[in-house]
Amino acid sequence: MSNFDYVEDAMFGKSIFRAESTLYPEYIPPELPTREEDIARLARNFRSLLGTEGSFSVNVAIVGHAGIGKTNLCKYTMKRFEEAANSRNINVKFLYYNCHSFRSKTAILRNVLSEHFRIQSRGFSDEEILDMLVKRLTKEDIRLIIALDEANMLNSEDILSIFHAGEYFGSEQSMISTIVISRPIEWRSLLNVPLSGHIHDQIDLQGYNRDQLLQILKYRAEKALYATAYSDETLNLIADICSASRNARHGLEILYRSGKLADLKKETSILPDYIRAAKADVYPELRRDVLEELRHHELLAALGVARKLTKQGITSTSVDEGFDSYVLTCEEYGEEVRGKSTFRSALDTLDKVGIIGKSVGPIEAGKRGRRAKITTFDIPATVLVERIENILSKPRNTHDFS
Ligand SMILES: Nc1ncnc2c1ncn2[C@@H]1O[C@H](COP(=O)(O)OP(=O)(O)OP(=O)(O)O)[C@@H](O)[C@H]1O
Ligand SMILES: [Mg+2]
């Protein structure tokens, strides 16, 4: 080989991306084309926080299928709402929580207090914590809006008691408002009569049609790529693919991956073949960061189950078999094996976030009880294995992954 420097080329060589990071999952674009009405509706819901004659808390639900902009709509609108209120000396504070990372009311409340009000709440009960929070909000006249994304990771009682928080503590004003975000099926399993009685507006967000997807793709491609890197034909091809799922993430991931492929092949533009290749690699229901949000032992549990499912001829497995495979996986990684009940609750979590599916089979003759059948959900087991191994091969940092 010549002494061509592959590392340096990868670092500083030509790329078709003008700003690659604008296609990362956490990026919120400065505009949300085609969502104008939903933005206005969401913001309008919180007008009652701005009144001079006291503020009244509001609870809003945003419900809709995968990848249609629920998270973006909420962050985009409420950040601006907060800024606009603050610039007029109305003290509004917007806090966003993804319940994949913060999985209980207690975890969320503690974080609100420690991160945003510098109050340590160790050793206090949830009621005491809420009391401290409400007192503080009242004293400083802060109207708090908490977004609970992926709210199905909490239970209805937890959400209900957050709804109740402002009302309970008897001040004239209610200081805590909530935005609950969920996909429809999960939402139905969460929603009950007491909960729905506290929701002032449920925004049922619709999926995008082909025209809307094309408009979004154009906007995002302009930001992320050089103009020479794609054509109308490129974007139309991608819009064709994702118009069935009505899912913007689906299209944007294909755009991103086909762009990466073009870079890898040292092409100056995205070829239709790259789009087809990228299409096979994208699982539109699965958020790219969902695996990274899992606890360490949950990843190992998922890897154990997925490895079992990659064995030829197997489409589903049982808790016991999955557990055996998990034990082997832990040994391979030199990790402590957790007990079977921990493994079971890890499976529940994986089921909730949509990585595996658990179904209860028929009662088998001669066996006690029903056996749960475990399969992978949206993503094939081999791909799951590859992605988890990849995550486990990197050092992991950030909060509590125990
Ligand atoms: N109107 C829009 N304009 C530009 N980009 C958009 C728009 N709607 C969605 N997107 C992009 O599509 C992707 C998916 O959006 P988002 O994460 O908000 O979906 P979601 O409904 O929360 O999905 P999930 O249920 O999987 O959490 C993001 O990258 C987002 O930036
Ligand atoms: Mg989301």
Image (spheres, grey):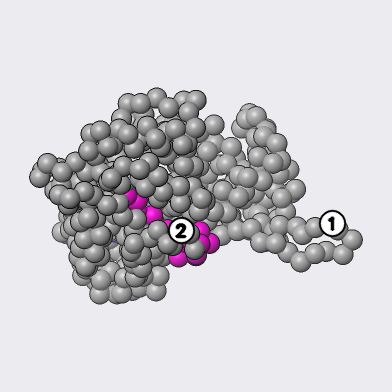
> In the rendering, at what x and y percent does residue 64 appear?
39, 65
Tell me the SS state at disc 1: loop
Tell me the SS state at disc 2: helix
Disc 1 target residue: 368
Q: Which mark is residue 195?
A: 2
Q: Residue at the left extreme?
A: 88
Q: Amino acid at mark 2?
A: Leu
Is residue 225 in view? no
Residue at x 28%, y 69% (from the top left corner) = 213
> In the rendering, at what x and y percent does residue 286 appear?
45, 56
State the residue in front, 129 or 173: 173
Q: Amino acid at mark 1?
A: Arg
Disc 1 vs disc 2: which is toward the camera? 2
State the residue in front, 389 or 216: 216
Q: Which residues are magenta?
A: 177-192
Q: Earlier in the sequence, mark 1 or mark 2?
A: 2
> In the rendering, at what x and y percent does residue 29 appear?
22, 53
